[in-house]
Amino acid sequence: MNRSPEPPDGQEPLPIDATEVPDATDARMAEFLRTTTNGAELRRELQRDGGDQASDLLARLNALDFVQQIVGSPSDLPTRIGEYLVKGVLGRGGMGTVYLGYQEQLEREVALKVLAPNYASDPTMRKRFRAEARATAALHHRHIVPIYDYGEAQGMLFFAMERVDGMSLDKHIAASRRLERRPMEPLDAARRFAGVADALGLAHRRRLLHRDVKPGNILVGADGTLALTDFGLAMVLDHASMRLTSKGGGFLGTLHYASPEQALGAELTPASDLYSLGVTMFEAISGELPIAAKTTEALLQSILHGTPRRLRDVLPKPPRDLEAVVDKLLMREPGDRYQDGEALSRDLQRIADGEPVHIRRLPLYVRIWRRMRKNPVLSGALVAACVLLVATLSLANVLRREKGQSLVSRHQNNLVAIARDIGREAGPPAGPLPLLQALVGLPAPAVAPSPSVMQAIDFAAKEVPDDEQVSALRTAYVEAAAPRARAFLRDGRGFEALQVYEAAIVQAVAARTGGDLAVEVELYGLYLGRGIANLTAAVARPNDARIDLALASYLRPGATFPQTLLTVLDLIDSVDVERAAAQLERELAAPSVSPERVRVFGGLLWAIAGLEPPVDGNLMDFGLGYQRRRVLHGTAMRLLSAPPAGWAGPRRPTGLAGRFASACGNALQRLGETTVLRELAENAERDLGNAVHAESPLQGWRAVLQLLLQSRPRGPLVDRDQQPLAPSLQLAAWEDLLSLSPTRDMMRLWLARFEELRLNHPGLPGLARVAARVHALARSDEALALAQQWLLEADGDPEAQLCRMGVLLRAGRVGEAMDDAMVAVQSSVVPAATLREVVRTCNEVLAETPAAAAAPVRGLAERFRALLDGPQAGGR
Amino acid sequence: MPLTPEIAFEQHRERLLSVIYLRMGPNLRVRMDPEDVLQEVAIEAFNSWSTLSDEQNAGAWLVTLARRKVARIVRDQLGVAARDPRREHAIKTDLPLADRRSGPVTNADRKDRLLLLDEALQRLTEDHREVILLMKIEGLSAREVGERMERSENAVHLLLSRALKRLAEELKL
């Protein structure tokens, strides 16, 4: 620090000459200070002079200017703006300054709002400003500050408004806060804001939104009346004042009063203005904000996801009706708020007059439900709070029993209890567990509804017999959501189930008024059911399933079932499948997860892995690589104490697919019997049309039937209308055909058609697998090359190894075939099954091989059969 | 046209805020926003407007209200009656206090300048600081300042002259 020799601070002022001997410069500066306040002349003089003294003096002048600039001076005011004489400053804000102006011709005072120069310089802003000023000038209302005039002068954009003798509401609120007084008495506030609400109503009818309702834009007149000002100005300045300026930047406008949709930058409606008015009223009544946060980010977060405080949180005894009005204004969903200012105004006026108000409020249990929904993490704490609330209410009820109100409020308690229990219960009410079991092919025991929920419902039903709400809730909770859909789903007819669910959802959504808990519970079940239907082979739309599960999860925050199912779907797609699997295992290891659920999800993974076929599953094929399937299988085995069903021979289609397979199998047996075939085809066609989604791979069966019906030598596989099928569906059809184990001769007959597909669509996913198997079966010359191709792409799938083994064996390359067989068995997740497959292939080849050449093959078969029978390979 | 308290207040707003800001000092500013104190002064001014004898003196009257307000806050907040809060905490003045600079752009610049000035003033001697505050911030006349500081008017001007030199050095002007 650059300290000059100065005397120490002292209380006693020392005679100046004793400590500081003024030099000539000091004296000159002092003289200047004594005589004049305008430094411009001295400055010019000094700049001419140069020299040490001059620069010293200049520095002192600069210091003086610095200080004077900070203090400012009243002489900064412009003397005139347009035809108005400026007499003072009324206020300053982000948008500009409000001057007190005087219109000489009319001899009246006006408030002149002058836009800050940075706004006024933008031509589009000028245009909008003009348009908005015109629209606002047309609004005549006692509670809107009238605009007299707008204009441009000296590059300034301004408008002249009525001069309201008073101050803005924000100043009034700040002042009261300082004095630790409440800004307004509640009933007084109701009366005063009724006018503002009516004014907003008028503007809204004229299709004019205020967009920036806040205390700063409401003037308090001398008689206490409130008047809105700055109509639509936010629209003019929106990009500057109402948005977050940039990442981490400050919010220039007033986020505190912004509705959730406004904070999001979404489209505004009259209800948005009413939300802002609600915040303003809250503050005017209590002196506090309903949502307060320290940082902009936290505030934004609270507006979007938090729950506003209620008047009772900040005031000892707010009038109940008024609190209800404010609550309603602060609803997050615009549709839940007042829809027009007039209705609000009427209610406020009635409150002020001491008349009862009938506000359509959401019932308590729905509000609790929604709160839980908003924040699943908090819902646990909320449930605890509910328990406390219910306990308190019950006690209060006992005390109030005689007062006649008790039945009603006790009934509400019951509903609260039910809502609480349903929300808390981790599992699905009745349906989806068995549904998922049906999907996977597990035996489905009936799952009893949660006893605690049932107890609550029964209790409520006893208390209030014949109550519609309670019985609707019971139906929604206990009884199957869309029983017909469930029946379809159990039968593997996912597409039909999907359609039933869809119709039911449309109906429930239409019936949903936002206040019916039973409908929400029902919707939960419907979305969950549709999600599962989307995972069936007949539909196979996993992305739609995700959406449904997310919706279900949203509707019932306590339920973890949809979330776990979502985790499984994520696992299927996950890049790091091992980590995702570990995550799922952790999720299922939670103590709240029932063993039944662990078993079902284990079965699901097991079925998705598809390494061992379930007895009768309807699950879609996710087309996963072998290594991924291995991980899923491993996870499934850890979750399941025992595999759901044993190996039942080669993989066969099950469920609906199984039925198509058997129909086509029949057709294959009776190839050439046209009438029978046609009948089979027609039956299957009905199913395919009605029971299978148009894009499901199961549609491939249709082509198989066409193929069997009309043995054309060439051309793509076609649908009923003889139109070529999508290549992926054609490939699915060929794979279906392979699953029917056609003979070598049949395959040779069709080979040319397959080759057309293979050569025209070389990049088709899964093509190598199908091609290798088709050619192996047809014993074509290319069989070995294609088997090798598959092996390269097979990700270690033992089936590919076995395929090449068969080809090699038929070529007489027994040694190499044996190597393949060994690798296949060793890499297999289920070695015994692979061994059996090796032996089966050997026997097949033996049957085709002339006796003279059979010996080596027979030897191989013997060795593997011995392995299969041996004690060490028998088990898994 | 009569002078209303709102107009008077707005006319002197910047000056009043500067008085409050500088008189509060950094330690007190951490506890209370000078803008809030300014609001309180405004309310007091509105409430006691009738006691103002001459509209010509509105500025000085408001400054007095602001000074008293700060003095009361110092007493309430620090429990130190009638003592200058700066001296209590003058040692800490090098600490940066720039984290209150949010808000509208228009205010930020002025606040930055106020902060700069405050920090520079802290490094001056009490006499120098006081003469700048009294004359150039609070707007007292040389005679009034002389009475307070027990100096002649000439001496006050000389003192201010030297104080400005020191201030220029601190502000590196």
Image: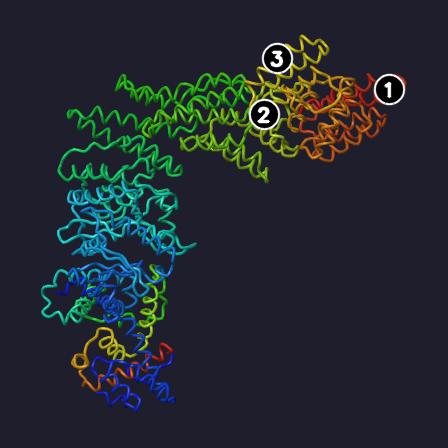
Q: Quadrant of the N terminus of chain A?
A: bottom left
Q: Residue furthest right?
A: A852
Location of mark 3 (residue): A682
Question: Which of the 4 image quadrants contains residue B100?
Answer: bottom left
Circle 2 SS class? loop
Q: CA distance from mark 3 to mark 1?
A: 45 Å
Q: Position of residue A377 (x, y in %)?
A: 40, 38
Q: Position of residue A727 (x, y in %)?
A: 66, 29
- Which numbered disc, 2 or 1, marks the residue that appears first in the sequence? 2
Q: Position of residue A336 (x, y in %)?
A: 31, 35
To which chain does the residue with label 2 belong? A
Location of mark 1 (residue): A854
* Relative depth, front residue between B48 and A141: A141
- Dot 1 crowding, Cα within 10 Å, few <14, some 14–19, many 20+: some
The verdict on a common chain for dots 3 and 1 is: yes
Tell me: A254 left or right of A552: left
- Dot 2 crowding, Cα within 10 Å, few <14, some 14–19, many 20+: some
Location of mark 2 (residue): A696
- Which numbered disc, 3 or 1, marks the residue that appears first in the sequence? 3
**As drawn, A638 above or below A701:** below
Q: Residue furthest front?
A: A105
* Relative depth, front residue between A234 and B120: A234
Tell me: B128 left or right of A810: left
Q: CA distance from mark 2 to mark 1?
A: 44 Å
Q: Amino acid at mark 2?
A: Ser
